[in-house]
Amino acid sequence: MKLSYQVIDLPLKHTFTIAHQSRDIQDTLIVKLEDAGFYGLGESTTNPFYGMTIENMTERLEAARAIVERGSWDHPERLWEMTKEIFAENPFAQCALDMAAWDLYTKKQGKKLYEYLGLSPKDIPLTNFTIGIDSLDKMVSKMKEVDWPIYKIKLGTDNDLEIVRELRKHSDAIFRIDANCAWTAEQAIRNSEVLAQLGVEFMEQPLGKDDLEGMKEVFLHSKLPVMADESCIVESDVKKCQGLFHAINVKLVKAGGITPGIRMIHEAKSLGMKTMVGCMTESSVGISAIAHIAPLLDYVDMDGAMLLAKDPAKGVQITPEKVSFPDGPGIGAEMI
C-alpha cells in the first residue's frame, strides 16, 4: 500500500464571497492510495474559517502513513476507526484519506461506489447552483450565466431581502438561501416571512452555531424550514439539531469523510430530519464522491466543480436532467 498526495490550486470563475470570507483561488489536497495495481483518489480543500491548511493536513497524513501503508485494514470503515485519534483535530485530512480508501476498495470489488452501497442514481436529487455574495448586478449576471432550476443564494449583507427580491425578478427557479450565521433570531423570523413569499424553499444556518436559544425561536416561528450547517459538523452534533432544525447539511470534509457522513445521514433520518450533503469549492474528485451517496438525500449541493475556471480532474457530469457517472468501478474520478 502506498500513500501519496499533491496540492493543486483551483481557479474560480468568479470571486466567491460568503458572509465571512472571499476567494479567487481555492487550494485543495488530492490524496492517492495505490495497492495491487489499483488506486483510489480523495480530496479536501483548505478552509481558513476552520483552521484547515495544507500544512496541518499533510502533517496528519504523515502521522497516519505507517498505519495506512501497513495495509492491515480490510475496509474503509476499519481504516477510519484505526486512524480516528490521529485525525481527531483534522477531519479535512481524514476525509481525503477516507474518500481515497472508498475509491480504492470499491475498485477492487469491481463496483461503483453507489452500487456497493445498494443505491440507484435515479434517486439523486438535483443539485442547486450557488450564487455568492456580490453586487446586485453581478449576482444577477452570475445567475443568468448558468440557467439552473435551483439556486442557493449566499446572504449575510445589509441588503439581503433586496438581493432576493432582485434575483426573483430574473428567475422563477427554486431559491434556497444560506446566511452563514449572519442573522439574529429576530432577523431570521422576520426575513422568513418575506422569503417565503419570494419562493424560497428553506433557510440554511441563519444564526451562529452556538445560539441555541435563538434557534429554538426560529424553529418554532420561522415561515420556512431551517437547515443546519455550521451547527452540524460531526456525528455527535446530529442529535443536538433535533428540535432546532428541520434538516441538516452534512459536509464530508468537516465530518471526516464518507464513512461518518453516511452514519450522520441515517441518524438524521431516524430523528425525522431531512438531509443534504454540501460541498466546498472542490474539483471533480470530491464532487464525484458526493454524487455516489446522493441517492440517500433529500437535497444536495454538489456544484463545486461547476464554479471552477479549470477543473484538474474529471468525473461525474451534472446537468439539470441527470447525473452521469463514468464507466468503471469506484468513485470514477481521474486527474487530467
Image: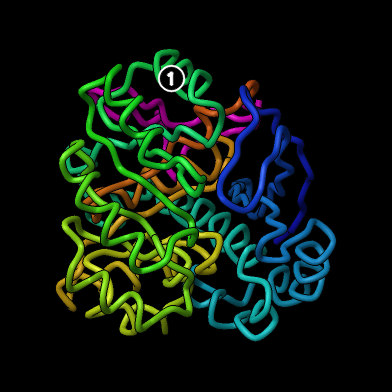
Residue ID at (73%, 68%) = 69
From the image, tell me which residue sits under label 1: 140
Quarter of the image where the N terminus is located: bottom right
Question: How many numbered marks, from 0 up?
Answer: 1
> Left of 18 or right of it: where is 85?
right
Which x, y percent locates residue 336? 66, 25
Q: How is the image coloured?
A: rainbow
In this rendering, position of residue 50 left or right of residue 137: right
Is residue 167 or residue 278 the one in the foreground? 167
Identify the residue shown where x is 23% and y is 26%: 173
Q: Residue at x 48, y 25 (%)?
A: 136
Residue 189 sits above or below residue 138 on the image: below
Residue 283 image position (x, y, % from top left): 59, 36
User: Is residue 116 toward the left or the right of residue 307 in the image?
Assistant: left
> Residue 166: where, in percent of width, then height?
35, 25
- Residue 254 lies in the magenta-colored region: no
Question: Depth check: 158 or 8 in front?
Answer: 158
Secondary structure mostly seen in magenta is loop
Label 1 Cα neighbours within 10 Å, binned few <14 / some 14-19 / many ≥20: some
- Measured as percent of width and height from the top left, residue 247 is found at 26, 64
User: Is 117 in front, or is 300?
Assistant: 300
176 or 259, nearer to the observer: 176
Tell me which segment is drawn in magenta: 311-336
Disc 1 secondary structure class: helix
Q: Quadrant of residue 214?
A: bottom left
Residue type, numbered disc 1: Val
